[in-house]
Image (spheres, rainbow, N blue to C red):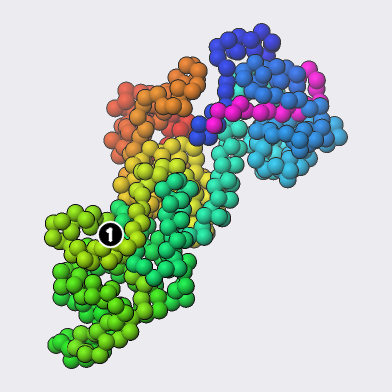
Amino acid sequence: MVGKHDTANRHAMQGQVRSQGVDGDMTPIRVLVVDHDTASGGSVERILKTMGFEVTKAPDGARSLELLAASTVDVLLLDLAMPGMNGLDVLGKVKALDSAVEVVLITAHGDVDSAVAALKAGAYDFLTRPLGSPDALARLVTRAAQHGRLAARARRLEQELEVRERYGDIIGSSPSMRFVFRAVESVAHSRSTVLLHGEPGTGKELVARSIHMSGRRAKGPFVPVNCSAIPKDLIETELFGNVRGASPRASENKIGLFGAAHGGTILLDEVDHLPPGTQVRLNRILQGTEIKRAGSNDPGRMDVRVIAATDVDLKQAMHQKRFREDLFYRLSVITIPLPPLRDRAEDMPLLAYHFLRKYSARSGRKIARISLEAMRVLRSHTWPGNVRELENAIERSVVMARGDVILPGDLPPSVGDTIAPLVPTNLLLDLPFRESKMKAVEQFESAYVHEMLKRSGGNVSEAARQSQMDRSNFRRIIRKHKIRT
């Protein structure tokens, strides 16, 4: 039995425990208490109710399974030693019925073997009688609920990815990305040139490839060209080809990249780097369907879809006489703007889990999820490198992770250094003062210790000395927040 009823009332007056959920989910935590001992189960039920939990009670395993089938439950508090169907039996059936329900076993003092067996069978944690303080019980139930809700969110993201991945690595459900998806579907079957505009790392080549694969040219070649990577004195030959003897360097016939893209699509990435003479020739080619190789008077037929991409303002370049006006209007028949990641923050978790699954499978590791703390760090980063930077961060985290969960310490230093400001957020303001203060203190502890460790080069003793803290207390905070050293 957990304390006396007046103890529960005293703790209830100190502040209610509420669901901390995932990403601001403030739905009350729903608990099912299963205990054949009416007095013990009733005591736990009363304590949790007074602390803000939604509680239902069942006298045995069979009744608990009926309630689970008929309602939503976050945490099952389950007595291990019950007549008939014991706790381990119930645990197995619960996980088969709804794997999202977290199970906390209650066992007699000293029955550690059964508790370990329960953990191996999927239980979140176990408690031994006597159960200790109501606050400790409430904290464990809250952590279990958070773990279950985060896992459920990860599963929902996985289901969304099954739908979204029809566009390959182009992931998102934000309004700006829905516009991109609609634009891809609209232009895929046309012959019109397309101009993709977006910052580096926003996925311009992915969108171009998706346009190609979604249209009639999908069976033809897709030829990506980085215009800035080709020397200016070679770019026309590389693009349009030459016949043998056309120049001292032309020792053999070359069809060029446009010729290689015949029947398919060519992507001219960083098209703003084309020199003026090449811009003139490209504009003439886009006017018709013929192309001449250097040194040849015989025009060849051209069947190529042209997609251009840039991260600069071509209109401004045009006004500055760095880009031809006539070529700009031919390339920008259809313009698709690609938003930076900072402007579609709601897509970040979906992208993060997509890359987690991709690189976990590639490395042969079974990393199931990203911890709530790590996700908060990811959300607080501004992502100047956009989706490419996020992909690299998740790939690195998969390599560095020690367990099956990505923790803040697994993230790259450039991302981990972005610590959320220690001011009340909307989430904290939605909580009662006492609980909000507790969360703010936890954030401060994690950020402070992380920064001191960085300053000391990971030397715990030196970091504790600079903090004027006892080394054991400093280590306790490290363990509490699972900070890598």
Which residue appears at 50% of the width and 40% of the height? 371
Q: Residue furthest right?
A: 84
Asked whether the viewer can see residue 473, the reply is no
**How many neighbours does mark 1 have within 10 angstroms: few (below 14), some (14-19), or many (20 or more)?**
some
Q: In front: 110, or 237?
A: 237
- The picture quadrant where one finds residue 336 is bottom left
Percent x, y for residue 33? 73, 27
Percent x, y for residue 253? 26, 89
Residue 39 counted in the magenta span: yes
Judged left or right of residue 52, residue 399 is left
The answer to whether residue 462 is above or below residue 260 is: above
Percent x, y for residue 313? 23, 54
Name the residue tied to disc 1. Answer: 310
| Magenta span of residues | 25-40
- The picture quadrant where one finds residue 310 is bottom left
Q: In front: 175, or 125?
A: 175
Asked whether the viewer can see residue 431, the reply is yes
Which residue appears at 58% of the width and 46% of the height? 156
